[in-house]
Amino acid sequence: MPFDEIIKAIRKELNMTQEQLAHELNISFSTINRWENSHTSPSKLAKMRLLEFCGRKSVNTFITSEIDKL
C-alpha cells in the first residue's frame, strides 16, 4: 500500500482532518497534504512517530504493518 493511501486510511479510521492529524503528530498541515498527494515521503523519524501515534490510537494493525514495510 502506498504511503499516501496509508495516511488517508489512518485519517478515515480516526475520522480526522489533515489539520487534526498534523496537530497530533506535531507537524505542519502542509506536510500531511504533501504526503497525501505523493509530493514527498516521510522521514524515518516521521514514520516512527506515525507508528507510535497509531499504537496509541489503536489503529487497525493492517495499516500499521503497511507502515513497517516502507
Image (cartoon, grey):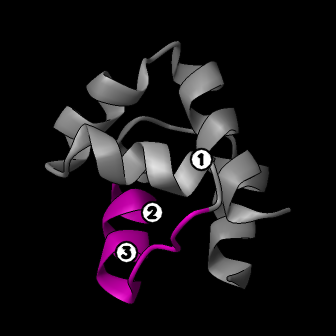
Contact? badges 2 and 3 (CB < 8 Å):
yes
Q: Residues within 10 Å of mark 2 (few under 14, many from 20)?
A: some
The residue that disc 2 covers is 51
Q: Secondary structure at mark 3?
A: helix
- Mark 1, secondary structure of its residue: helix
User: Residue 4 at what x, y percent from top left?
Assistant: 68, 53
Q: CA distance from mark 3 to mark 1?
A: 17 Å
The segment highlighted magenta reads: 39-53
Image quarter of the C terminus: bottom right
Q: Residue furthest front?
A: 39
- Residue at numbered disc 3: 48
**Residue 19 screen position, x and y as percent:** 29, 26
For the point 18% across and 34% down, which residue is it?
23
Q: Which residue is mark 1?
A: 36
40 part of magenta stretch? yes
- Residue drawn at point x = 52 percent, y = 12 percent: 15
Of residues 55 and 6, which is closer to you in this image?
Answer: 6
Q: Amino acid at mark 1?
A: Glu
Answer above or below: position of 30 versus 62: above
Give the CA distance from mark 2 to mark 3. Answer: 5 Å
Q: CA distance from mark 2 to mark 1?
A: 16 Å
SS label for mark 2: helix
SS assignment for the magenta stretch, majority: helix
Residue 29 screen position, x and y as percent? 28, 38
**Looking at the image, is mark 2 or mark 1 nearer the viewer?**
1
User: At x 34% / y 33%, what residue is drawn?
Assistant: 21
Which is closer to the viewer, label 3 or label 1? Answer: 1
Left or right of 61? Residue 19 is left
The three-letter amino acid code for the residue at tag 2 is: Leu
Q: Is residue 59 above or below residue 25?
A: above
Residue 48 sits inside the magenta stretch? yes
Question: What is the three-letter code of the residue carrying label 3?
Answer: Met
